[in-house]
């Protein structure tokens, strides 16, 4: 650990170090998050996170009351005769004097990972950790309510010997939300793989056209990448070297590119680059210079629809002691970060998660660095899940998945648009198969970019939504963070929506279709209340995630071993 969070270090040859001040942007019109210091010697609580959690609980149909002043309770929520209170703090079990968003970003590694492209820890220009914490607080509270609530407003016991109407207290913190957000990077830094060297180097996309337009490229196909660059006259060696950094950027938060690639796009006008991209199978997304206007559906990053007939009476939950969702069965068909993180959070809440993987297993299991015999990054999101190997391209594979869903409570997927329908795994079919099922879909763009949207991954979504403009240090042109902001927040939002659906299904017996997207997560972050006011951190900034993992002040919230992972970000008590 070292002192100070600074920003605006030289990001690479395509950008300058002008305005080398702080990693925040000036607050836009609205109500930006204020510095959270002290009032009369008393630390101010994370009000923005508390308000977000309360608003999402109300959207889920809960009655919410604020906690008594000075009680430490953020709010109490009620649904179906069940009651749960939430305590939300800055530090939680982390033994550091964290007094605000800037402190949390500095101490818990967010500024470090975001700042890799700039060469030094750089604070985000949005209250990212507070936003994630608000969703986690709502998710934990909804899970506690779902465990206690039964059909028609009756209540179940979470543990034997407790009163049926005794309230559960849910505790979480902004620090634990930040650590969850860097969990993949933390696991990689502590994997103990001697054959792996973490890449480093400032710079990276976006690219720039001859007319000054800035854009993100996206493809998951190395062949399409090579065709695009050779069409622009770049030699194969330079294109191949660029692919290695480009393909790893989601995992490493760095992407130093050969100068030849940046020079190639700078020689051509944007219309020509778009034509080349279409012809070679690469997606181009312009980087917005400001957030796009909010949509009517953006009040919360998930939507619920009621579907199907009344299902069987809900089983009691939470009796096994693994968490409030102990007794819930989840089938997960997901890849990359967003969907697996949602399933990971449901497992941390006590659910049994069965992950569907292709025959032979998910190839991401072998992605370096390895922690034992499995990718540290993969394990950070998928440890503890059961596995069903099934080929969705075959009738037998689809039948195997449907058989599991027939006895499940939640089906979670991040399949490409339309693929769930073609595979017979859409909400209508599965809820007819299993009345009362929660069908949760995690997508990139939602329905906003048409029937054939571009590839919906994190960095194009940051670029198109305008989030990139908010997280770029002042004086530099907009650039998406290479920290997977929308993947993580989108995964947390999907988990929140799934648990909201589960509560509704348990109260009414009818299934719920839940839709979430990376774009809805980005738009949540673009709201005025998450645009942070200028604030300097008062604690040292993390510059080494391995050192953070070894710091005893973080020990209560980390599971140690090869590939250190954050523990579940909630505590539940009566």
Image (tube, rainbow, N blue to C red):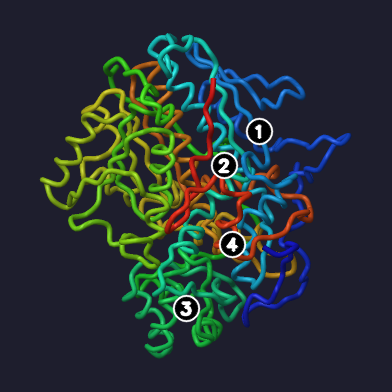
Q: Earlier in the sequence, mark 3 or mark 4?
A: 3
Q: Nearer the viewer, residue 559 or 274?
A: 559
Of the two numbered discs 1 and 3 in the rendering, the one whose residue sits closer to the viewer: 1
**546 vs 134: above or below:** below
Residue at 37% x, 88% y is 236
Contact, CB < 8 Å: mark 3 with mark 4?
A: no
Element type where label 1 sits in the image: helix
Outermost left residue: 396
Label 1 environment density (alpha carbons within 10 Å; few <14, some 14–19, many ≥20): many
Residue under label 4, please give it: 547
Distance Cα–Cα, label 4 vs label 1: 30 Å
Contact, CB < 8 Å: mark 4 with mark 1?
A: no
Element type where label 4 sits in the image: helix
Contact, CB < 8 Å: mark 2 with mark 4?
A: no
Distance Cα–Cα, label 1 vs label 2: 23 Å
**Quarter of the C terminus within the rendering:** top right
Q: Earlier in the sequence, mark 1 or mark 3?
A: 1
Residue under label 3, please give it: 272
Of the two numbered discs 2 and 4 in the rendering, the one whose residue sits closer to the viewer: 4
Residue under label 2, please give it: 295
**464 vs 494: above or below:** below
Label 2 environment density (alpha carbons within 10 Å; few <14, some 14–19, many ≥20): few
Q: Earlier in the sequence, mark 1 or mark 2?
A: 1
Q: Position of residue 495 (x, y in %)?
A: 44, 38
Of the two numbered discs 1 and 2 in the rendering, the one whose residue sits closer to the viewer: 1
Label 4 environment density (alpha carbons within 10 Å; few <14, some 14–19, many ≥20): some
Residue under label 1, please give it: 50
Q: Position of residue 214 (x, y in %)?
A: 58, 71
């Amino acid at each position: 650990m070292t002192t100070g969070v600074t920003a605006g270090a030289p990001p690479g040859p395509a950008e300058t170090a002008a305005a080398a001040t702080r990693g925040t942007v000036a607050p836009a019109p609205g109500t930006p998050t204020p510095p959270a210091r002290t009032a009369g010697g008393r630390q101010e609580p994370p009000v923005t996170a508390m308000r977000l959690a309360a608003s999402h609980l109300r959207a889920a149909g809960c009655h919410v009351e604020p906690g008594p002043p000075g009680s430490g309770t953020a709010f109490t929520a009620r649904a179906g005769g069940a009651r749960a209170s939430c305590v939300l703090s800055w530090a939680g079990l982390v033994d550091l004097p964290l007094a605000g968003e800037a402190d949390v970003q500095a101490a818990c590694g967010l500024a470090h990972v975001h700042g890799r492209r700039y060469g030094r820890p750089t604070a985000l220009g949005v209250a990212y950790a507070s936003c994630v914490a608000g969703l986690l607080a709502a998710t934990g509270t909804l899970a506690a309510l779902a465990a206690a609530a039964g059909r028609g407003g009756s209540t179940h016991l979470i543990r034997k010997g407790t009163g049926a109407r005794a309230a559960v207290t849910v505790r979480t913190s902004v620090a634990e939300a930040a650590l969850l957000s860097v969990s993949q990077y933390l696991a990689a830094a502590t994997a103990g793989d001697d054959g792996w060297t973490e890449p480093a180097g400032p710079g990276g996309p976006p690219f720039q056209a001859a007319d000054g337009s800035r854009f993100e490229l996206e493809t998951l196909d190395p062949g399409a990448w090579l065709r695009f660059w050779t069409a622009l006259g770049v030699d194969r060696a330079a294109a191949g070297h660029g692919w290695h950094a480009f393909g790893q950027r989601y995992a490493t938060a760095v992407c130093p590119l050969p100068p030849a690639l940046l020079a190639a796009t700078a020689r051509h006008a944007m219309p020509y680059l778009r034509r080349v991209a279409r012809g070679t199978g690469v997606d181009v997304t312009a980087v917005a210079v400001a957030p796009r206007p909010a949509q009517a559906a953006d009040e919360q990053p998930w939507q619920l629809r009621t579907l199907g007939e009344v299902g069987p009476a809900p089983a009691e939950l939470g009796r096994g002691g693994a968490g409030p969702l102990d007794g819930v069965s989840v089938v997960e068909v997901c890849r990359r970060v967003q969907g697996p993180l949602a399933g990971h959070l449901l497992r941390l809440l006590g659910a049994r998660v069965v992950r569907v993987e292709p025959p032979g297993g998910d190839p991401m299991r072998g992605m370096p660095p390895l922690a034992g015999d499995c990718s540290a990054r993969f394990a950070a999101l998928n440890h503890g899940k059961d596995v069903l190997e099934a080929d969705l391209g075959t009738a037998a594979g689809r039948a195997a998945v449907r058989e599991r869903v027939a006895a499940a409570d939640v089906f979670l997927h991040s399949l490409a648009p339309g693929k769930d329908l073609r595979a017979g795994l859409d909400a209508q079919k599965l809820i007819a198969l299993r009345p009362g099922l929660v069908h949760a879909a995690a997508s990139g763009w939602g329905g906003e970019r048409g029937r054939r949207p571009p590839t919906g991954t994190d960095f194009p979504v940051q670029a198109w939504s305008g989030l990139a403009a908010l997280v770029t240090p002042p004086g530099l042109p907009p650039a998406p963070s290479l920290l997977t902001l929308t993947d993580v927040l989108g995964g947390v939002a999907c988990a929140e929506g799934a648990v909201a659906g589960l509560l509704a299904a348990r109260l009414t017996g009818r299934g719920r279709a839940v839709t979430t997207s990376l774009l809805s997560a980005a738009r949540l972050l673009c709201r005025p209340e998450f645009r942070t006011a200028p604030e300097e951190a008062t604690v040292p900034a993390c510059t080494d995630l391995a050192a953070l993992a070894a710091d005893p002040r973080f020990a209560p919230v980390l599971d140690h071993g090869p590939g250190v992972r954050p523990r579940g970000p909630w505590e539940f008590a009566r």
